[in-house]
Image (spheres, helix red, strand yellow):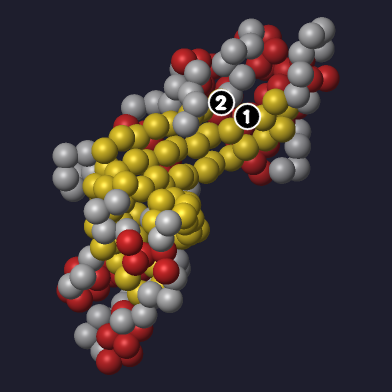
Amino acid sequence: MYVPPPFQGPEPSKLFDFIEAHSFGLLVSGTLGKLCATHLPLLVRRDAGPHGQIVGHLARANPHWQELSGTDVLAIFSGPHAYISPTWYEAADVVPTWNYLAVHVYGRCQVIEDDPTTADVLADYVQTYEATMPRPWSLDTTTPFFRKLAKQIVAFRIEITRLEGKWKLSQNHPAERREKVARQLATSPRADDQEIARLMRENHAG
């Protein structure tokens, strides 16, 4: 990912926070003689391995998994984004742009072959996403129904080798222009615009 110095993302702990908040990612690999990409939720295990892990699962019917083991992969996580109009700067010689946050995770993928570890991955999914439900649903991994469904998915882990974050929040503009942009975005009905406005002000204050 191209990351000019002004847009460099924060430290790894905050990048992990970002992934957890925007966990529906894009898994990309060069397999089956071509580029493959699958959209799916992914979970972070911060303390696993030297640099952390990403875990997930694919449908067994999806051929993407068939050559994943031992390959280098990229997982992309996208956050809020907003169009920036040059009219908001109230200045000459400016152009439109886009503000956004994104994290790229690079690592070596390993397909999980054993049933108990696959069950652990699925249980982690349920526990993570049901935690905020008013009446959390629980997963019983001992039932024939679960064992039947588990055969239809393939779990995997990614040993993280590198993290990259891009926080493009108009840092390359003077503070006065940044505030004008944030003010405009804050009045937008789009939730992403409002979040970018908040992040711009938070980033500038920091």
- Left or right of 49? Residue 146 is right
Which is more toward the observer, 98 or 10? 98
Task: Say which element carries label 2.
Answer: strand
x then y, percent, for residue 86: 79, 20
x then y, percent, for residue 73: 36, 48
Q: Are marks 2 and 1 in contact (CB under 8 Å)?
A: yes
Which is more toward the observer, 17 or 41? 41
Q: CA distance from mark 2 to mark 1?
A: 5 Å
Question: Is 4 placed above or below 148 here?
Answer: above
Question: Which of pointers 2 and 1 lies earlier in the amino acid sequence?
Answer: 1
Q: Which label belongs to residue 167?
A: none
Circle 1 Cα neighbour tier, 10 Å, few/some/many (<14 / 14–19 / ≥20) = some
Amino acid carrying label 1: it is Asn
Which of the 4 image quarters holds residue 135? bottom left
Amino acid carrying label 2: it is Lys
The reply to whether residue 103 is in sight is yes
- Left or right of 92? Residue 110 is left
Which of the 4 image quarters holds residue 125? bottom left
Question: Is 46 placed above or below 84 here?
Answer: below
- Name which residue lies at 73% across and 18% down: 180
Q: Which label belongs to residue 99?
A: 1
Question: Is 11 placed above or below 173 here?
Answer: below
Circle 2 Cα neighbour tier, 10 Å, few/some/many (<14 / 14–19 / ≥20) = many
In the picture as drawn, the residue positioned furthest to the front comes out as 33
* Disc 2: which residue: 168
The reply to whether residue 13 is in sight is no
x then y, percent, for residue 46: 25, 44
x then y, percent, for residue 75: 41, 47
In the picture as drawn, the residue positioned furthest to the bottom comes out as 144
- Name which residue lies at 67% across and 35% down: 82
Task: Say which element carries label 1.
Answer: strand
- Name which residue lies at 57% across and 16% down: 171
